[in-house]
Image (spheres, rainbow, N blue to C red):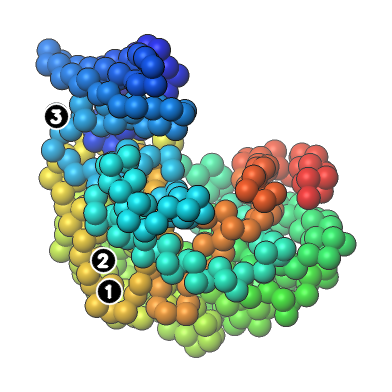
Amino acid sequence: MDIKIYGHNEENAVREVIMSFFTNLEGISVESSLTQNDGRVLVFTKIKIGENEWEENYTQRAEDDRQIRNAIKKSAFLCAKKISKNPVPWGILTGIRPVKAAFNYFKEGYSKEEVKEVFKNEYFVSDEKTDLVLKIYEKEKEIIKNMNNSAVSLYIGIPFCPSRCVYCSFLSSSSFTKGIFQDYLNALIKEIGLVTKHISDLGKRVETIYFGGGTPTVATSSDFKRIFDALYKNIKPDGIKEITVEAGRPDTIDYEKLKTLKELGTTRIGINPQSMNDETLKTIGRHHTREDILKAFEIAREAQIPCINSDVIAGLPNETLDDFKRTLDEVISLSPENISVHTMYIKRASKLKEEITDISMDYHKEVTNMIHYAYNRLSESFYEPYYMYKQKRTVGNLENIGFSKEGFECLYNIYMMEEFQTVIGLGAGSTTKILYGDRHERFYNVKEVKEYILRLDEQISKKLVSF
Ligand code: SF4
């Protein structure tokens, strides 16, 4: 896509709006120009595809940067809508966390009706999605009443996987070799030790811990014992409300490992089928079957892990609405406490992106129907939405959403997503987000494993002086 902008610098905002309508951007040229006069803006957008052109002149009052950016996005949105019939229910709400936006408006004193108005008129969000945001807002508002404001959460990254899924752009996922892994573990344990000592010296508590990846359960039981030893040397286990370990690939777990994790304090694991269709699993490069998922559930229940999350994806390659229904129905029958429904999205570096040339309107509709089915079916089965996020380049600009049975909502997901609590990231590719009142600062550990090991001390020092 070729974008030319005049009179403003919001090229990315225009790009995001256009991308929520079209996935194949080849041959699309966009022109966006802004003129301002006496508190009003006029935004002209022209989209050209081949010999055809569409135009939109949009004008409104705009007094601050946010309103000007929104006017630019609205003009691009209205112009793209003349061409594409794809449903874009989130309107111009791109690059913004919807529930966090709602929290901010309520904090500024808006009433519920006013927030609804803003979502509808300022962001072009559908009534259905606005209601969803408000429902999640109410749920999270209740949950954070019990949050310890001075505590922190930890994210521990283990960026290794047994094989690479085709939709993954993750850097080191296919580089699982014993040698590198043990070096990585040694570095990670050093970082955990020094950072948790600092947390304890400051008199702070750790409220939640999240092991993400990759697939952290590529680590053995004795690897986990070393990691937890390093953690518990400095932080009191009794203050921790929740420990999640992503165990996404069933080929990385057995009863003994899950029992060890439970004994070490794990309260929640993720067993992620993505699809219960063996053909699809092969296509997307996951080395497990539907049968393996059933077994994984059996051993997790036997190990008495209190909360299981299962991820499913709407819009996987070659899957129809019926395939998705079968997956979701079967996952519900396994009765995990949490189910996360993701929308297929194509990450920049993924293998799938190289293969996809176009995504048709029928596909957009099919994915939208899958999401509708998920809401209805999960609600009938007593799962309620409790957190959500949107990713750029999602098909139809749809959302990823976490559902939970009452009382099993993942605290870490809420604290991290809405920026309610400081999250300290440990390990390669992790992000640290330190909150100072309404402001926050981010630090990134390097992504590449070898680089992380080499530059470990520098990354630890940066963190220790920042909080
Ligand atoms: S399990 Fe997750 S991190 Fe690992 S390759 Fe698949 S998508 Fe990537």
- Discs 1, 3 touching: Cβ within 8 Å: no
Give, as a three-letter code, the residue at label 2.
Tyr
1 or 3: tag closer to the N-terminus:
3
Where is mark 2, residue-wise? Answer: 375
Mark 3 residue element: loop
Give, as a three-letter code, the residue at label 1.
Ser
Nearer the observer, 162 or 152: 152
Mark 2 residue element: helix
Residue drawn at point x = 56 percent, y = 64 percent: 412
Q: CA distance from mark 1 to mark 3?
A: 35 Å
Look at the numbered disc 3 and say if its residue's Cβ is closer than 8 Å to ligand 1.
no
Position in image of residue 345 (x %, y %): 34, 45
Residue drawn at point x = 36 percent, y = 42 percent: 93
Q: CA distance from mark 1 to mark 2?
A: 6 Å
- Discs 1, 2 touching: Cβ within 8 Å: yes
Where is mark 1, residue-wise? Answer: 379
Local packing at callout 2 (Cα closer than 10 Å; few below 14, some 14-19, many 20+) is: some
Give, as a three-letter code, the residue at label 3.
Lys
Residue 157 quadrant:
bottom right
Nearer the observer, 378 or 103: 103
Position in image of residue 200 (x %, y %): 83, 64
Where is mark 3, residue-wise? Answer: 82
2 or 3: tag closer to the N-terminus:
3
Q: Is residue 182 visible?
A: no
